[in-house]
């Protein structure tokens, strides 16, 4: 029986590996679209993604996979709950049951819609014109609602969507969490407003050379532990990280000549996601376990470096900015930049529209998570609405949005 179980598990893992390979191939195409692909490639790229993700979906939802899961659930019933074998079968069962409810035609349509919408979102963001993107957003929201209807839900459509990424989480639970946060944050905002000028952050707005900023940020995340033998950094409209396996986990950032922190802290945040992926065991590669426990856990790893680390812990790792960034003010070394970079104010960055809200000195990018469906975004002003709208665009895998 042991040998039979091992054969069946090996067969399941081989199918899962092929499904993962197809999905990762789609993720490479998505990464290329957001970094190097010429504008004329959008329609072709949409069809390529649709083909790959449909093939992956059909292979994963086959009757053969269902039978293997069923047999292995019985044969591994006495295995330790957190063993690799039992966990692979358990997580595959959950993903399989959800995926079987989604018709291949819907998967294909979602892939095409996301790819076509993305460059429109980029232009709308650049032009601060939410109306340009609105029809594409409406289409993606409609697709998300079809996902929710196909999966089924008891109370709210969003319950079906969030459960795909955060198992067991519901809208009602989120409401409770947000109510508690609101009770603490509202008075905090009022207090911050009273001390808005406590930190002079003018040093961050001095026209730093973009290429040198990227080099500086990459040097820092390397010192934090991001392995450049298994990763690389590029520029994109919105920062993200994406992993194609243990040996290839990439990050992107964006850079502003007139605001130093945007590139620096974007790189730190994404490297946190990437280091989480780089630290995962190769024995679970090409299985549903490799992507991480959940987007929430993934985000905790990035925020450990992004905002939770004490400035005094990161300061010794900072290169000297006046060496790499010639226009940095004299006498202001790395130890002086971090406290200024951590300043918070109840203001909106000049390039963002909308009402005031708490933010660090850098304008924080959207913490969007990953996975196809996120519900309808509610914008605060035109530019903020375009920024939030990114979260409903589907992605092939679990590429991490900040």
Image (cartoon, grey):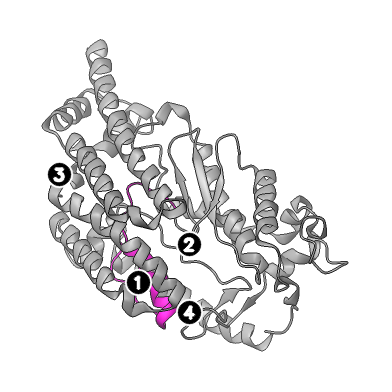
Whichever of callouts 2 and 3 sits on the residue coming sooner in the sequence is: 3
Left-right relation of 285 to 103: right
Residue where numbered disc 1 is placed: 175
Please, what secondary structure does the residue beneath circle 2 have? loop
In the displayed orientation, state which residue is furthest to the right.
331
Residue plotted at (34% across, 56% down):
40
Spatial CA distance of label 1 from label 4 is 12 Å
Whichever of callouts 1 and 4 sits on the residue coming sooner in the sequence is: 1
Which stretch is magenta?
Answer: 371-400
Marks 4 and 3: in contact by CB < 8 Å? no
Q: Position of residue 110 (x, y in %)?
A: 23, 55
Whichever of callouts 1 and 3 sits on the residue coming sooner in the sequence is: 3
Please, what secondary structure does the residue beneath circle 3 have? loop
Residue plotted at (31% across, 26% down):
79
Q: Nearer the viewer, mark 3 or mark 4?
A: 3
Residue where numbered disc 4 is placed: 183
Please, what secondary structure does the residue beneath circle 1 have? helix
Residue density around tag 3, few if under 14, some if 14–19, many if 20 or more, within 10 Å: some
Check if residue 286 falls in the magenta segment: no
Residue plotted at (36% across, 39% down):
24
- Where's the N terminus, which quadrant? top left
Left-right relation of 150 to 11: left
Q: Position of residue 392 (x, y in %)?
A: 31, 63
Residue where numbered disc 3 is placed: 100
Marks 3 and 2: in contact by CB < 8 Å? no
Residue where numbered disc 2 is placed: 237
């Amino acid at each position: 029986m042991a040998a039979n179980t091992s054969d069946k598990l090996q067969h399941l893992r081989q199918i899962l590996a092929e499904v993962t390979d197809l999905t990762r191939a789609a993720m490479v195409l998505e990464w290329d679209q957001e970094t190097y692909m010429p504008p004329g490639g959008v329609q072709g790229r949409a069809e390529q993604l649709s083909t790959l993700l449909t093939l992956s979906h059909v292979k994963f939802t086959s009757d053969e996979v269902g039978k293997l899961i069923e047999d292995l659930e019985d044969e591994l019933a006495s295995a330790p709950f957190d063993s690799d074998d039992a966990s692979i079968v358990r997580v595959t069962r959950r993903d399989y049951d959800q995926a079987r409810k989604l018709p291949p035609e819907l998967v294909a349509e979602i892939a095409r819609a996301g790819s076509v919408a993305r460059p429109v979102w980029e232009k709308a963001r650049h032009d601060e014109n939410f109306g340009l993107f609105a029809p594409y957003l409406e289409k993606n929201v409609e697709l998300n609602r079809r996902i929710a209807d196909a999966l089924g839900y008891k109370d709210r459509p969003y319950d079906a969507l969030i459960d795909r990424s955060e198992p067991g989480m519901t809208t009602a639970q989120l409401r409770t969490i947000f109510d508690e946060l609101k009770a603490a944050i509202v008075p905090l905002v009022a207090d911050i407003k009273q001390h808005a000028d406590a930190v002079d952050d003018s040093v961050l707005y001095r026209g730093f050379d973009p290429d040198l900023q990227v080099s500086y940020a990459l040097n820092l995340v390397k010192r934090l532990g991001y392995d450049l033998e298994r990763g690389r950094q590029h520029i994109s409209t919105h920062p993200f990280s994406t992993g194609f396996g243990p040996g290839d986990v990439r990050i992107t950032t964006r850079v502003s000549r007139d605001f130093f922190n945007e590139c620096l802290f974007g790189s730190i945040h994404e490297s946190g996601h990437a280091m989480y992926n780089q630290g995962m065991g190769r024995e679970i590669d090409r299985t549903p376990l490799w992507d991480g426990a959940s987007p929430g856990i993934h985000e905790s790893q990035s925020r450990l470096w992004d905002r939770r680390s004490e400035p005094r812990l990161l300061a010794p790792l900072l290169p000297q900015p006046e060496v790499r960034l010639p226009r940095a003010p004299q006498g202001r070394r790395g130890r002086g930049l971090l406290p200024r970079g951590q300043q918070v104010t109840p203001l909106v960055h000049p390039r963002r529209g909308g009402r005031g809200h708490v933010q660090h000195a850098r304008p924080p990018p959207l913490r969007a998570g990953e996975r196809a469906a996120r519900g309808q975004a509610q914008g605060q002003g035109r530019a903020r609405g375009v920024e939030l709208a990114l979260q409903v665009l589907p992605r092939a895998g679990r590429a991490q949005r900040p």
